Image (tube, rainbow, N blue to C red):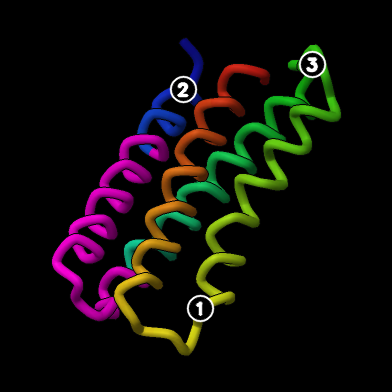
Amino acid sequence: MDALTPIGFIVAGYAAFVTIAAVVGVVLKAPRPRWLDQLAWMLEILAVVLAVGALAGWSSGRKPESLSTFLGYLGALVCLMPLALQSMRNDRSTWSAGVIAAAALATGVVAVRVMMVR
């Protein structure tokens, strides 16, 4: 186990937390709260930390089997949450929390995949 593995677990676990928080909002049919946006941006910061760490490992000699897959996962990891948040920036409806739930779930899955292919 290297130093990047705990970061991967943290990103995946936090993504699950954000997903659950957003799904609760959808189930309660409440407007999307501002704190959910803050949770989503924190997930993005953690995803960027994981991506930078994975890139640092790659540049120091750890070569993935498929470089294109690895770089594609890194790109998805850092782009999913900002795209979701930007797409419904002015929409505070219940379903905008569903968008955050889907993006957080996808971010967690991609974080796990990054750890598997690196």
Of residues 3 and 108, the one nearer the viewer is 108
Above or below residue 30? Residue 108 is: above
* The C terminus, quarter of image: top right
Q: What separation in Å lies between label 3 and label 1 (alpha carbons)?
A: 37 Å
Instruction: Say which quarter of the image contains residue 100.
Output: bottom left
Q: Determine crowd level at label 1: few under 14, some 14-19, many 20+ residues with C-alpha closer than 10 A.
A: some
User: Residue at image x 54%, y 46%?
Assistant: 49
The disc, 3 or 1, on the residue closer to the chain's N-terminal end is: 3
Pointer 2 residue? 5
Q: Is residue 55 above or below residue 3?
A: below
Q: What residue type is labelled 2?
A: Thr
In the rendered structure, find residue 88 and report the number of the disc placed on it: 1
- Residue 22 on image: x %, y %: 28, 59
Residue 7 drawn at (x, y percent): 43, 33
Magenta-colored stretch includes residue 106: no
- Which secondary structure lies at badge 3? loop
Which span of residues is magenta-colored? 11-37
* Observer-nearest of 34 and 9: 34
User: Of the numbered discs in the image, which one, if any, rests on residue 63?
Assistant: 3
- Nearer the N terminus, badge 2 or badge 3? 2
Residue 107, x across and y down, in percent: 50, 44
Amino acid type, residue under disc 3 in the picture: Lys
Residue occupying image coordinates x 26% and y 46%: 17
Question: Horizontally, is 49 left or right of 52 in the view?
Answer: left
Distance in Å between CA atoms under marks 2 and 3: 16 Å
Q: In this view, does 34 lie to the left or right of 30?
A: right
Of badges 3 and 1, the one in the foreground is: 1
Say if the magenta span includes residue 12.
yes
